[in-house]
């Protein structure tokens, strides 16, 4: 005999399939290291990897978001070569935080997703430079990059909004 | 009057008037006919002119494109020649920049030569004009170069004019030559070169002094150095084996 209390509530999975998410992540990582550099604003570049992580994390549960953050952070640490595990740790934490935050709002709201992207950028930068200082870098480097973090947040929000508008346009056409 | 004029070998008034009249008339007719002829010729040859004009425009466009291509080739050849000189001079490994740090958090680039090509960690990297940086990580097919402007970069440096030593430390946009004795008479535009060290042989240009910071209560002075190489536009570099 079963009662309704025995049934565990499982949130429906609304994210993209894993191979599509992986392809987006790979494309974002390659673009970040090759072409995005040419669109630097005041020596700061937007992070397509972070945009992909936030995009995925607001649609899935915490565990999936953390695993995606792990993959994204590892990619960045491998490509950056001298950051140790700073990107890995900071991106896992950021993806987890984003996923937790997104439980309370609709993932297609542009202002909310833009706000979460900005918060994610700043939190990740804070965690990154904290880990870097633990790895032996001068503690003041984080402060030196504070302005860059704010500019990066604005750029990431712009990229996220542009991506959402493009996807929305495609969805309207398909409908 | 005509006979008399013939006898006396002078011009008769009739002849003068007539020749004047005919001269004017001929001129008028010639001018008119010439104008009509040229207008008719123009009208007749207009399509040909248009064709000639189009052909000339096409030829001009081709020449402009060819000129641009030749300029590009000349620039590429100059860059290639400069790199060749460095390759021969240092017996180095020629490489091409293929990537940048994903978040621009460090001053580094990725090059398309790795351990398989003989690149090793801490090898120096130079371009035509001077120092680029040193190898920080080596993969089989690619390597990461920490630029001379990166905060973690430290290179033994010498002022070429007077052989005063210091340490060239990366400062994001520029290089700071630290630990230069206070009595060294540094000047703006002094050239800074590498000292003999782990990654470089001596004498490779790092950059030129743009300003000098002297404190009253410090043992050393600091020279702010503008890198000799345009690190924002790197393309071909040479890895200098240790």
Image (cartoon, coloured by chain):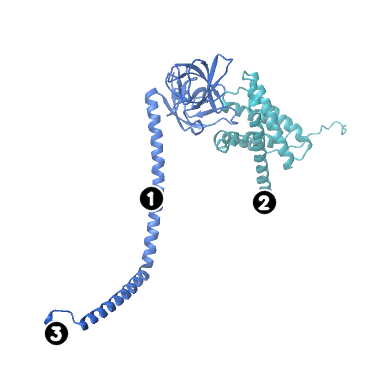
Chain colours: A cyan, B blue
Counting other residues with Cα less than 10 Å from the Cα at mark 1, is it few (<14), some (14-19), or many (20 or more)?
Answer: few
Q: Nearer the viewer, residue A153 or A56?
A: A153
The image shows residue A32, relative to residue A81, as above or below, that is below
Residue at horizontal 39%, vertical 47%? B66
Q: Can the viewer see residue B142 in this picture? A: no
Residue that label 3 marks: B4
- Name the subunit of mark 2: A
| Same-chain status of marks 2 and 3 | no
User: Which quarter of the picture shows residue A74?
Assistant: top right
Q: Is B29 displayed left or right of B47 in the figure?
A: left
Give the secondary structure at mark 2. Answer: helix
Foreground label between 1 and 3: 3
Q: Which mark is residue B97?
A: none
Distance Cα–Cα, label 2 vs label 3: 107 Å
Q: Which residue is mark 1?
A: B63
Q: Which residue is mark 2?
A: A173
Mark 2, mark 3: which one is toward the viewer? 3
Residue at 39% over, 53% down: B60
């Amino acid at each position: 005999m079963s009662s309704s209390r025995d049934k565990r509530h499982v949130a429906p999975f609304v994210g993209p399939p894993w191979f599509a998410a992986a392809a987006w992540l790979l494309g974002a990582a390659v673009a970040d290291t090759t072409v995005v550099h040419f669109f630097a604003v005041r020596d700061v570049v937007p992070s397509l990897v972070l945009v992909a992580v936030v995009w995925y994390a607001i649609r899935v549960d915490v565990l999936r978001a953390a695993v995606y953050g792990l993959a994204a952070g590892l990619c960045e640490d491998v490509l950056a070569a001298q950051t140790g595990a700073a990107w890995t740790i900071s991106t896992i934490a950021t993806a987890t935080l984003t996923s937790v935050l997104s439980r309370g709002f609709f993932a297609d709201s542009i202002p909310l997703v833009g706000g979460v992207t900005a918060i994610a950028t700043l939190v990740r930068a804070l965690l990154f430079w904290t880990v870097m200082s633990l790895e032996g870098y001068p503690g003041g480097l984080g402060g030196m990059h504070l302005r860059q973090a704010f500019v990066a947040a604005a750029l990431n929000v712009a990229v996220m909004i542009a991506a959402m508008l493009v996807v929305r346009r495609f969805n309207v056409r398909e409908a | 009057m005509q006979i008399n004029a013939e006898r006396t070998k002078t011009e008769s008034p009739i002849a003068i008037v007539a020749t004047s009249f005919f001269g004017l008339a001929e001129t008028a007719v010639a001018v008119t006919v010439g104008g009509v002829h040229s207008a008719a010729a123009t009208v007749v040859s207009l399509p040909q002119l248009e064709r000639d004009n189009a052909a000339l425009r096409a030829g001009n466009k081709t020449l402009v494109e060819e000129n641009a291509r030749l300029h590009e080739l000349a620039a590429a050849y100059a860059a290639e020649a400069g790199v060749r000189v460095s390759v021969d001079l240092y017996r180095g490994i020629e490489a091409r920049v293929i990537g940048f740090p994903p978040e621009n958090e460090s001053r580094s680039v990725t090059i398309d030569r790795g351990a398989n090509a003989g690149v090793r960690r801490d090898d120096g990297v130079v371009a035509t004009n001077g120092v680029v940086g040193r190898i920080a990580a080596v993969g089989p097919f690619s390597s990461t170069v920490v630029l001379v402007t990166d905060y973690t970069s430290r290179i033994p440096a010498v002022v070429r004019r007077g052989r005063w030593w210091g340490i060239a430390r990366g400062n994001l946009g520029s290089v700071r030559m630290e630990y230069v004795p206070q009595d060294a008479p540094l000047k703006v535009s002094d050239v800074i070169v590498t000292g003999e060290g782990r990654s470089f042989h001596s004498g490779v240009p790092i950059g030129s002094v743009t300003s000098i910071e002297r404190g009253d209560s410090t043992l050393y002075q600091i020279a702010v150095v503008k890198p000799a190489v345009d690190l924002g536009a790197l393309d071909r570099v040479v890895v200098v084996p240790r």
